[in-house]
Image (cartoon, rainbow, N blue to C red):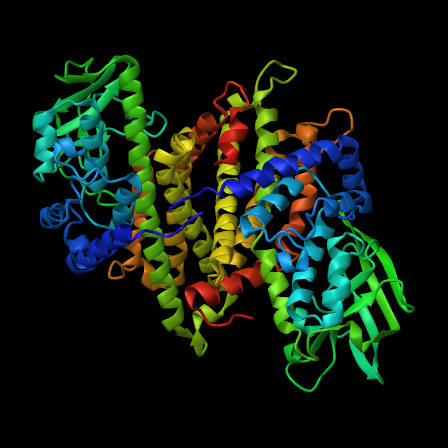
């Protein structure tokens, strides 16, 4: 067992931490509230190779592991970076894996944030399904020009800003979401990427990867929320003493610290399982997303509450974290639905007894 | 990065499973559950014969020098199987302590007897007046020539009725701060003035209260220096806190899953109800996080790194999440969940009822969740002391 990062992973973490603490202060996050995207910051990401980290070498990529992508996502979560890192990574890897759309993959490698993907969760988009008007919410849909989507007939790419059905809109977490018309039934033009089993596998893989990166990102949101709350609890004096000395303040924060550590370990384990314990990979991704969602939302909430009324004031940063934790979780369908997915992946609903091995781990 | 426990731990898992298959029958399991005492001499001697009591001890003391992952796996498998293992845990730890700080005589005479499974110890820390505040112990040990006279009372002395000795925390000074006047003695349970009385719990455990009236022990029964036992106490609690109940959580989710996948009398599988599915997912996630926190504690121990508040995290999370799941499941499964194992109509091997009765204590003994959260707040978040 080894739960430490190796030297190159540590360098990666340090490099991104340094860049982000400098280039992404919360003043930038506030400036980007209405668009959810900072082109300037995305350029800095691309200078460090973030756009091609997960792509194969044959596509001009660095062929880094999901763990390494995840480490960057966690650092991004620390500062609420307004960039489509997860979407570019998951959707780009999907295209490169299929060997499709070479020119679009090349665009990504050049640093253009021109690709996103639909995260379809039937229950999460109740009342807003495609058939009800052909409007699907796509993360970073407001800046992308291409969206990967799927239906019963397979996997396809919808291109062109004319399929976008809404402009930049203010949303809870500055997610740069926009509605797209992704319904092929409605006559939307699309290029087929894969069909049949190949499409299903590629899609499941891409969604697992996005969920995993979202888990890493939420871990970052939770870690920084906790640090902000603990800092405040040490400094804020009431009744003549720092409020962190009261169990009513200290214990909820401690409980969050425990859950945050668990969320980080779970995300790491899922990423590690990609190559080392592949039978559990998809299940662990679902576990990591649901737990990181629950944990980030709870931690941001407890931290906000620790601030008293100040936490509610837009001048204070913690309210940004409170909103983004919920937003990322919601885009992925929320934790409750993901827990059902954990059960489906784990127990496989066929009673074959495989569950014991999946639960027991390596 | 590597999340595997390693080939040696895998081998231990195989060996223990073989041991259990050969020596621990379904009748044994039921008897152990009914007895609730946490220790069975026949089974224990078989474990000792296999070298498992001293498995984690250094080879120079007759141990097997096994690493923390192997020891974790040993307890994991025994616990999941329902094996009465409390005596094993206590004795393994007390052997360690005697090797580190016992007298030459204790190391030469007592340690080998523990390894051979001849003698067993109960832990005597808690008292009626000192639970969380363990340093507040008031059981007095007073010098009388070369002997000590012990007077007082202990509570929750699990295995005190089957062990030959109690590893007993006493007060030897009231001059300084409470944790600077504590001394440990090995007190024979058959000594004159020792009265062991049973305590039965809702969870089915049998523990003990121990009354001590003018109990005379020689100075050679003292472990470590006079007034300096606090570090020993903290070490033992630290070990317990770094464990948690992930093994039992794993058994619980497996039982719940098996139950959910089986069609009921109406032909429907509970699994197909979204509420059940969601709770299965939540229980599985809790079990996984508990396991990871425990593995991390073990990794830190193996690396010789400081646990900080991470041992406390392990038990705190495991205790609270298992308790919560046990309660949520009882709400979901309806009245059949109330029926005890072995009774007509029991479901999931009675695991819903058992977990519901047993889990409340997991957030209490070995450090209440409040104590643990304070430790985490101080060690991991740098918050001021809050108790």
User: In the image, is residue B251 above or below residue B202?
Assistant: above
User: In the image, is residue B99 above or below residue B27?
Assistant: below
Q: Which of B277 and A87 is in front in this view?
A: A87
Residue under the point 79% across and 48% down = B37
Image coordinates for residue B160, horizontal then vertical, percent:
81, 57
Image coordinates for residue A8, horizontal then vertical, percent:
25, 51
Image coordinates for residue B254, horizontal then vertical, percent:
58, 31
User: In the image, is residue A194 above or below residue B91?
Assistant: above
The image quadrant that residue B158 belongs to is: bottom right
User: In the image, is residue B103 above or below residue B199?
Assistant: below
Image coordinates for residue B86, horizontal then vertical, percent:
71, 51
Q: Can residue B276 be seen in this view?
A: no
Residue farthest to the front, as pictured = B60
**On-image quarter of the C terminus of chain B:** bottom right
Residue B383 falls left or right of residue B118: left
Residue A287 falls left or right of residue B105: left
Residue under the point 71% across and 56% down = B91
Residue under the point 32% across and 45% down = A216
Residue farthest to the right, as pictured = B192
Q: Which of B31 and B335 is in front in this view?
A: B31
> How many labels, in total?
0
The image quadrant that residue B20 belongs to is: top right
Q: Is residue A107 visible?
A: yes
Residue farthest to the bottom, as pictured = B175
């Amino acid at each position: 067992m080894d739960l430490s990062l190796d030297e190159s992973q540590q360098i990666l973490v340090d490099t991104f931490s340094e860049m982000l603490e400098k280039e992404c202060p919360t003043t930038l996050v506030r400036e980007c509230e209405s668009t959810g995207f900072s082109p300037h910051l995305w350029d800095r990401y691309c200078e460090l190779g973030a756009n091609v980290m997960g792509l194969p070498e044959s596509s001009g990529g660095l062929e880094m592991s999901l763990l390494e992508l995840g480490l960057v996502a966690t650092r991004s979560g620390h500062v609420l970076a307004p960039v489509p890192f997860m979407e570019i990574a998951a959707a780009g890897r999907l295209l490169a894996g299929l060997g499709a759309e070479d020119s679009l993959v090349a665009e990504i490698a050049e640093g253009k944030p021109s690709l996103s993907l639909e995260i379809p969760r039937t229950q999460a988009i109740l009342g807003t399904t495609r058939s009800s008007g052909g409007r699907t919410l796509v993360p970073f849909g407001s800046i992308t020009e291409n969206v990967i989507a799927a239906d019963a007939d397979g996997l396809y790419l919808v291109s062109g800003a004319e399929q976008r059905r809404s402009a930049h809109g203010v949303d809870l977490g500055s997610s740069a979401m926009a509605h797209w018309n992704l319904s092929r039934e409605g006559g939307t033009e699309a290029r087929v990427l894969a069909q049949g089993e190949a499409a299903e596998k590629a899609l499941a893989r891409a969604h697992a990867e996005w969920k995993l990166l979202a888990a890493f990102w939420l871990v970052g949101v939770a870690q920084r929320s906790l640090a902000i709350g603990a800092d405040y609890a040490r400094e804020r004096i009431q009744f003549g003493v720092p409020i962190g000395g009261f169990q009513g303040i200290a214990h909820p924060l401690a409980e969050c610290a425990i859950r945050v550590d668990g969320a980080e370990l779970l995300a790491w384990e899922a990423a590690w399982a990609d190559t080392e314990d592949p039978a559990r990979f998809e299940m662990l991704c679902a576990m990591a997303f649901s737990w990181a969602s629950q944990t980030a939302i709870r931690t941001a909430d407890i931290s906000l509450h620790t601030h008293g009324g100040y936490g509610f004031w837009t001048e204070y940063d913690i309210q940004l974290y409170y909103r983004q934790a919920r937003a990322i979780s919601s885009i992925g369908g929320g934790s409750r639905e993901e827990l059902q997915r954990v059960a489906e992946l784990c127990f496989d609903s066929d009673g074959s007894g495989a569950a014991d091995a999946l639960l027991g781990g390596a | 990065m590597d999340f595997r426990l390693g080939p040696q731990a895998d081998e231990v898992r195989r060996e223990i499973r073989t041991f259990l298959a050969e020596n621990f029958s379904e009748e044994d399991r039921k008897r152990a559950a009914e007895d609730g005492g946490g220790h069975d001499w026949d089974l224990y001697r078989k474990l000792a014969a296999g070298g498992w009591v001293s498995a984690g001890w250094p080879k120079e003391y007759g141990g097997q020098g096994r690493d923390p992952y192997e020891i974790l796996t040993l307890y994991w498998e025994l616990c999941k199987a329902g094996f009465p293992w409390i005596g094993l845990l206590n004795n393994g730890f007390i052997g360690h302590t005697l090797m580190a700080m016992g007298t030459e005589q204790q190391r030469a005479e007592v340690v080998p007897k523990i390894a051979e499974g001849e003698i067993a110890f109960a832990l005597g820390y808690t008292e009626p007046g000192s639970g969380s505040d363990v340093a507040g112990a008031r059981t007095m040990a007073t010098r009388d020539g070369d002997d000590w006279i012990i007077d007082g009372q202990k509570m929750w002395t699990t295995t005190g009725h089957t062990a030959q000795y109690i590893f007993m925390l006493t007060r030897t000074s009231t001059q300084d701060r409470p944790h600077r006047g504590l001394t440990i003695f090995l007190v024979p349970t058959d000594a004159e003035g020792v009265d062991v009385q049973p305590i039965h719990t809702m969870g089915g455990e049998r523990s003990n209260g121990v009354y001590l009236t003018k109990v005379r022990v020689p100075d050679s029964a003292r472990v470590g220096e006079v007034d300096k036992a606090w570090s020993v106490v903290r070490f033992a609690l630290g070990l317990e806190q770094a464990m948690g109940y992930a093994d039992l959580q794993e058994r619980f989710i497996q039982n719940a899953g098996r139950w959910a996948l089986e069609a009921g009398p109406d032909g429907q599988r509970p699994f197909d109800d979204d509420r059940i599915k969601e709770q299965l997912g939540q229980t599985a996630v809790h079990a996984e996080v508990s396991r990871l926190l425990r593995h991390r504690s073990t990794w830190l121990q193996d690396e010789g790194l400081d646990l900080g508040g991470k041992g406390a995290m392990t038990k705190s999370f495991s205790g609270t999440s298992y308790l919560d799941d046990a309660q949520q499941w009882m709400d979901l499964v309806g009245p059949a969940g109330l029926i005890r194992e072995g009774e007509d109509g029991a479901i999931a091997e009675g695991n819903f009822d058992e977990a519901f009765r047993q889990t409340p204590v997991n957030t209490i003994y070995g450090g209440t969740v409040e104590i643990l959260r304070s430790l985490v707040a101080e060690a991991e978040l740098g918050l001021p002391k809050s108790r």
